Image (cartoon, rainbow, N blue to C red):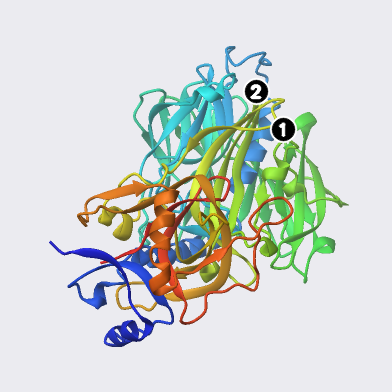
Amino acid sequence: MAVWEAQYISLSKLRALLLLQGIEMKKRIFYAAAAGIIVSMMFAACGNKKIDETASDDTTEAVETEVQSEAPSEESVKESSEGIESQADAPEKESIEEKAPLIQSGEAAHYDGQVLFRNYSSQALGYGAIWGKFQRNSTVYVPGSLCTFDPKAPEKGITTICEDSGNGCLYLKDGNILYSQKVTDSSSESVETSHVYKKELPDGRDEEICPGEIQGFSPDGEHFVVYSYTLDPYRMHYFIYETGDIDAETAHYEPADGATFLAMDKDNAYFLEKKTDNVHTIVQVSNNGNIYRLGECDFSELAEYGISNPEFSGNVSTENGELRAQFDFYEGTGHFYYTSAKVSVPICRDTDTEAGESVLYDASVEDVHFEEDPQSVFPDEIKDRMYEYPNPDSGKGVANVIQHYEEMDEGIYFTRAQSHRDSFEDVGWREYYCLLNYYYYFLPKGAKEPVLLHTMFEPLGKKGTLEDYEYYETQPTLYAYAGFYEDKDGKLVGAYYEEIYTGGPETPIEESKLYNMAEFSDEFYYEHLKDDYSLEDFVVGNLDEFSDYIHSWIPQNSVPVRPAQYDENGNLKYEPELSIKDGDSVYLCHLGFDKDGKIYYIRPVIMD
């Protein structure tokens, strides 16, 4: 058995050893090392995972950008579905115990007296995302589950109904028939990786219907629209299906140059089809397959740099024989809102007669401007929680961003991702954030604070194995150089740290040069190898043990421990001029953060 010990390697000795592998280190690293194991294995931590996932994310983003530039976004589908649902003839509900409407859609739905939502697998989300806004439909899914909670007593927790591999919007028909989509193939040779399926709750099996993604349902739940595409050349396709024991295709619409789904009523689906750079056509596709070009919308006066790019706001209605919809316009790479257009056009009632390519009516286009971006207006109850990014002057690195939400009679259901600034992956001025955790909440109507329903990742410090921690990191942590703050009694109260990255055993460590600071949580854990140095057994200690451990090295090797300074509110004060310099000793470790952004977990990097 190899004998493991905590030790320092001086800068000169470490550089000499690493030069044999073509690696030059700039800092002295305080770490756990194995005596007798060659130095070339020292950097085999979890860096390979990051390289693989980053490459996958880049490829996925490129494909998604091409497809989604003309296809409707998940948010647009959600909002447009809600808009047309309100027109259904279903009776108003006084309580969720009454009969559910024929079709429900959204992030959550009423089911069997409870609220149904999708609990994603921890592998469903990517490593990170620009501005901490994570996609849920870019990977082949490890199955998650469908869960419920009681909106009258959410503090009782959640109940798992069944396994589920779907993503995105839930469509619940007749109270218990789930329609959704799932990713089934990530191969670049596949024409379509997403497939529509349905199943009867609580224990029905998935019944695959067709390739593609659902865009919306008719208010009576009898028809739905599916978006799909083909490659070489890239073409968009929309299909209308009729629900039943066997869901059957009834219509196919293939726009020549892209189109955005707007809404469905009982008999038709509606789209905005691109004709030229600035002219778009409102298209009506009946359930029987007839296509009508209702009116052309000239957005020339709303164009930026000669080209208009109308984005569907989700605000739409088909009442009183007229389609009315709102489109928003943005400028620059920063996607800054500058104006909107309200469009109205008559609906064709004679859907038994084909109309060909002729345009039937004159569409009205009204230029309107709102003080706020219409697509960034959120419910008052959660608007201050939507985007919580760290202030650069605070030294904090943790962000909390609401990913999706659903307004219900009983309150607001929402999910929130906690992530950490990751400057390695920034795209220009756009900041990148790596995932730390994912939370599910319900805010009861009238309540000030939400109830935490579920946390995607279990708390760290569960005594994992070296394989779990270093090669297949099963729970996200931040890989960092760290120094520490102590109070006047010598107790460690926080850390200042620099994010680092390594791509594998023969890859040098990259240093972000971005320094952050965080206080220690009252629930701090320190996980390290057991005294007998078994790689299969970790033990968990508390903050006092960790403080003693760090202080034991101060006289010999100058472990960076600084006296803490506090602001007028009693919070640990950030020192912007502080940095980790060449020649400094550092503690190479994994950091875990609680939902308040405090460090509650530290584990030394095991250099195998």
User: Residue type at mark 2?
Assistant: Glu
Q: Quadrant of the N terminus?
A: bottom left
Q: What label sits on residue 398 in the rendered view?
A: none
Task: Provide residue 103's location: percent of width, then percent of height.
Answer: 57, 26
Tell me the SS state at disc 2.
Answer: loop
Residue at the spot x=17%, y=73% of the render? 36
Q: Foreground: 4 or 603?
A: 4
Please determine whether, in this image, residue 219 is positioned above or below residue 167. Answer: above
Give coordinates of residue 388: x percent, y percent.
Answer: 66, 51
Q: As displayed, is residue 576 above or below residue 476?
A: below
Residue in the foreground of this view, choosing between 432 and 302: 432
Residue designated by label 2: 410
Is residue 563 rendered to the left or right of residue 299? left
What's under tag 1, amino acid-wise?
A: Arg
User: Badge 2: few (under 14), some or many (20 or more) residues near its Cα, within 10 Å?
Assistant: some
Q: Would you identify the image quadrant in which residue 219 lies?
A: top right
Q: Earlier in the sequence, mark 2 or mark 1?
A: 1
Q: Residue at label 1?
A: 349
